Amino acid sequence: MKIKVKNLGVIKQAEFSLGDFTIICGENNTGKTYATYALYGFLDLWRKRFSFDDYRYIPDKAFDELRENGVTRLNIAEYAQNAQKILDRICRGYTLDLHDVFAASEEKFQDSKFQVFLENDVLSYSLKPMSFERNIGIGRQTLSLTKEKGNEELEISLLVDRQIRNLPPRFIERRIAGAINKIIFSPLFPTPFIVSAERTGAAIFRKELNFARNRLLKEMSQADEKIDPRELLYKSYQDYPSPVEKNVDFTRQLEDVAKQKSFLASKHPEVLKKFADIIGGTYRVTRNDELYFIPMGKRVKLGMDESASGVRSMLDIGFYLRHVAKRGDLLMVDEPELNLHPENQRRIARLFARLVNLGIKVFITTHSDYIVKELNTLIMLNQDKTHLKKIAKREGYDNSEFLDPERIKLYIAEEALIKLDGNQRRTRCQTLVEAEINPELGIEARSFDITIDEMNRIQDAILWEED
């Protein structure tokens, strides 16, 4: 899918596509995090941001059938033909709520625009393999929504009482609309998991965050009766962007998270071993919700405040890989290089490549030349040449780490000459510029190359220039 944004933070206008592996790099304050948070917010909230005001999901004929017979059927394929129109409405509703995603004032986003375009026709994939079932109870009645594998129809029925006079038509339409949207768009929009740049603080203060919530609840219980507790609770959290809030909530719930087991833990323990090599040990959460780091080969348990900053920065990723990860997910990491030695930055690049090849999409923002150069190596090794196979074996690379350049999208956040909507002339403004990716040469990441060339020039002058 292709995403287009306008007046988003410092970004005047930009377009980018979501690949199996998407990278945004560039200098500080160039819009990388804005683009990342906006995309995360959409993928996290699109189901809740549909506007029902100007779109009818259920024709009158279907309502009549439901009233008379207690059952009606809708052809999902017919709705899929209007997928882009439905998506445009979702995006308009989401754009109005961008200030909530960033925990900022509405004025900062009053001219913003967020759009998603389906690059491939939604009908190019089959709806038949998917199934859907949901029962909604209202009093003595149950509204059943069912789509069986092998067909493209959504069956809507009343299981108890066929009389729907007591059910508001708008209520019924909203539930059916939600089902149709989920059936059509869920295969197209991956489930996101965000790891924000603020993650190290969430790791070390996770207990204090619990205490803060407890103190808040105590304050609510002792507050004046005129104070709305829900308003007080919301106010305490609205100062944080939703990705940061998600990190805090995830870190606070590690005891419950640890009860789950991801497909990586079940079928690909080698991935967890590679991750353990990066952090130099493993995480452990006890039944009493105590979190420890256990270094390899040592009989010691370290709290997060005693552990290296690199261990804290990788906490969310570690628990995601072991307990949450599913094929089709989108793992989004803001600056994965945080607090990592250059060698471990190379290792995390190789770990991401393994995840991509196992069916997990990866989206990162980075300042790390080490990560980009390592990705270049994985791209360049992905060729059927004898000398490359020898190099890969000699240097310890595995086929599971090689990257197909067709699956990678890399964008540089920088100023460039582009045509703004409605203008024929090019204007220089802050945007995202897609980098070329060559199967033999890798990624052209000039934002890093300019800085490296300048450093080399200065060092050459120090070594070779004379008075």
Image (tube, rainbow, N blue to C red):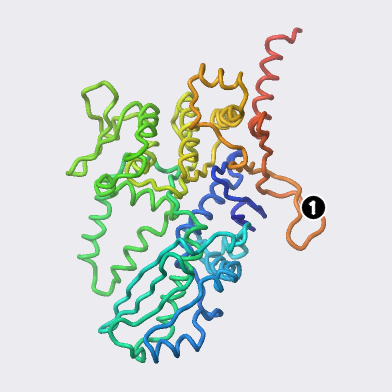
Circle 1 sits on which residue? 426
Return the x and y of residue 157 as percentages of the image width and height: 37, 81
Q: On the image, which quarter does residue 351 sit in? A: top left
Vertical side of 456 occupied by 383: above or below: below
Q: Residue at x 44, y 74 (%)?
A: 154
Q: On the image, which quarter does residue 344 sit in? A: top left
Question: Label 1 neighbourhood size at 10 Å, few (<14), some (14-19), many (20+)?
Answer: few
Q: Residue at x 58, y 40 (%)?
A: 28
Vertical side of 49 occupied by 61: above or below: below
Visible residue check, residue 194: yes
Q: Quadrant of the N terminus?
A: bottom right
Kind of residue at disc 1? Arg
Q: Quadrant of the C terminus?
A: top right
Outermost residue on the right side: it is 425
Q: Residue at x 28, y 32 (%)?
A: 293
Return the x and y of residue 300 as percentages of the image width and height: 22, 25
> At numbered mark 1, what does the secondary structure look like: helix, strand or loop?
strand
Comparing 239 with 280, the one in front is: 280
Return the x and y of residue 73 as percentages of the image width and height: 45, 79
Visible residue check, residue 207: no
Comparing 299 with 409, the one in front is: 409
Q: Is residue 355 left or right of residue 255?
A: right
Outermost residue on the front side: it is 150
Vertical side of 457 occupied by 260: above or below: below
